Image: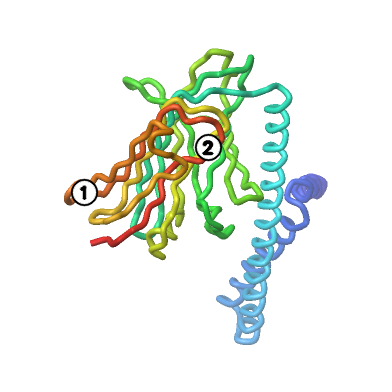
Amino acid sequence: MLKSFLGWLRDYVIYTGIVGLAEGVLGILAFGGLLSALLGNSAIKAGAIVAVLLGVIGLYILLIANRVEWRSRTELDRRLLQHYCSVLKERHGHSWRIVSWLESAVVRPNGDATEVITVTAIVECDVLDFFAIRTGAGWHQSERVRRKVKVNVKSLEVDGIGGTRRDVTSTWLDDGRLEVLAHFGSPASRGDEIVMVIEKEWPGKCAPLMRERRPDEFALKFACAIGYLEYAIHLPEGAEVACDPVGLVKGQHDFSLAVKRNGAGPTEVCLVARGIPPRLRVGMRLDLKKVR
């Protein structure tokens, strides 16, 4: 029996490490101290209460240390995965051509944003294992806020078929953007059409516009040419906003920009553009006048 216990203890320490063992010991001490505080005499109770407090504080410190350690490991794993995916992309010439990019963003009064992107692309390499996008708030956000950003990628649902989620990995880059990799269940081949729906929950993304009332730019830049772009921003009910195009010039580019006020509904700013050349930053600059 003792041999079995020692074997279990050895495996437990190997699996959880010293931090895990210390957590277990402190947990036992805290539980024992709690029983003594409830059942013992006054002197024992006083000592037990101190033991319980020390045990709880110790457990809290170890919990924080364990959480920091695992977060560090996770971030390292993400960076390594992002690095090797970049290597594969360059080595095997991963490329695609975007046929259409449909993006809709709902902006709440506190600056939080919910975005849905439907992207249709044609594979232009022999084998495509994953699809990558880089996205950001356009301004510096704290790490605490970044951890709350959520991104899902799924296939397009048509007549009840589709809509399953892809495996997604993401890494924060040094420039403050988030690189999202959507991994395919099976590789796509040259000429295949891929359609994905990207859903983003982004706390505080539009805070400069909504909270600070400063002009803000909603702009995109693509590495490849874009056949059709539709970008709609839905502002809170009663919002009055001024807008200008970004990167697009009348007479040089095929585009339209309009503000639609839906009475009691949200205000929509919509940009439609065609034939966008590679690496041209396009979008709109918004200036919130007021929200009734």
Q: CA distance from mark 1 to mark 2?
A: 33 Å
In contact (CB < 8 Å): disc 1 and disc 2: no
Figure check: 62 above or below 85: below
Name the secondary structure under disc 1. Answer: loop
Indicate the quadrant where residue 58 lies. bottom right
Question: Residue shown at 42%/39% (left/top)?
Answer: 249
Name the secondary structure under disc 2. Answer: loop
Left or right for 16, reference 227: right
Q: Nearer the viewer, mark 1 or mark 2?
A: 2
Q: Give, as a three-letter code, the residue at label 1.
A: Gly
Q: Give, as a three-letter code, the residue at label 2.
A: Leu
- The residue labelled by disc 2 is 280
Dot label at residue 265: 1
Q: How many marks?
A: 2
Q: Nearer the viewer, residue 57 or 9?
A: 57
Report x, y in % for residue 232: 35, 41
